[in-house]
Image (spheres, helix red, strand yellow):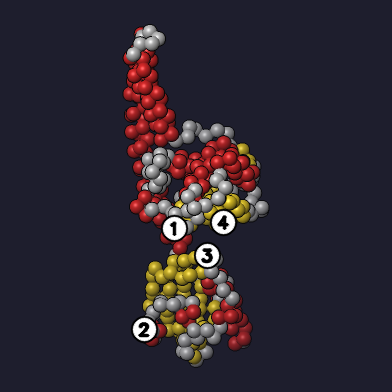
Amino acid sequence: MPNRKSDFCQELLEGMVTAIVWVNQREEIQFMNSAAGELFQLSTSRLIQQKWTVLFPNLVDDLSQAREKKITIHEYSILVAGVGTVRVSCTISPYEIQGEFGWLFEVYNTERHHRIVEEDERWHQYEAGNLLVKTLAHEVKNPLAGILGATQLLQKRHQPGDRDLVFLEVISKEVLRLTNLVDRMLGPKSSREKAWHNIHELIRYVLQVIGGEKPPNIFIKQDYDPSIPEVRIDFEAMVQALLNLVKNAIQAMERYGGLLTIKTRIEHKFTLGSNTYPLVAVISIIDEGEGIPESVFDSIFYPMVSSKQAGTGLGLSVSQNIVRNHDGLIVAESTPGSTVFHVYLPLKKEP
């Protein structure tokens, strides 16, 4: 009976999604469940008999702090090989197993929760700013049309060679330039009919378009997951969205050159906005440029915000609008030498 009970407890712990680690009184790891191995991306058998600080450096100064009562540490970051920094909450409890005193570590991955909250907050800010800019753009467009109409009437009243025609031509050209700028601020027009497409064909077309503009000191690496099913998209609009991102990546590396990596992967049970999708396709565009300055990072998807001196600040805004029209989202990460734009597109079942 004791063995059956022990086997049942072992199976129960292995089935938990919470990472569990038990440390004996000599502060050595004696047990880790599968969730812990998955969280740390380490072999559980290799960590047995290792000191607990291998997994949790600088978590607490002394485990004796948790000898009489449990303690919880929030906002603790662990370094996971191949993933990077992951935020977790960790509870340490005094726990006796088969007469031996020790400590039980329960580790909760809070990274996904943080990401959802941050994205939701950022998206609400973006929508508010975007609505303001679009409202102003609409208000500007009407008087521009009036100015252009009046200018064209004046041009008709002048004879060829009249001195004033030169100034009227300047006014006409500048009004058209501003009208085009306002149209870009308003974003893409209503989406055309969506159809099923392979995202790698989409990327191939974008790279073909950009081929003539790519400097010789920039190299492209393609890292694809061929198992990604087709996605239902407006092909031309998505070409524009990806083209803006790829052009930005190339411009960020023009000075020193570098590697432009385009990677595709699948995420399972991924939350976008208020919806959780079973499968989401991710297109990651990674450059080795100087990075996005912190002063503008939180507002890069707002219209008219740019970190480039000659930039209009409309490319990322347009791309985000297009992807949002596909129920997706663009998320950016940036440090000097590595900037990543992740394009998330939900994979919906083909009828």
Inter-mark Cα distance, 2 to 1:
39 Å
Inter-mark Cα distance, 3 to 4:
14 Å
Q: Quadrant of residue 316?
A: top left
Residue 125 % position (x, y): 36, 47
Residue denoted by label 3? 83
Which residue is located at x 44 percent, y 66 percent? 87
Please state if 4 lies on the left or on the right of 175 as rendered: right
Which residue is located at x 39 percent, y 79 percent? 60
Check disc 3 and give the amino acid type: Val
Pointers 2 and 1 in contact (CB under 8 A)? no
Residue 172 % position (x, y): 38, 21
Which residue is located at x 38 percent, y 84 percent? 62
Vertical side of 153 occupied by 195: above or below: below
Quick one: label 3 or label 4, which is nearer the N terminus? Answer: 3
Residue denoted by label 1? 336
Quick one: label 2 or label 3, which is nearer the N terminus? Answer: 2
Inter-mark Cα distance, 2 to 4:
39 Å
Quick one: label 1 or label 4, which is nearer the N terminus? Answer: 4
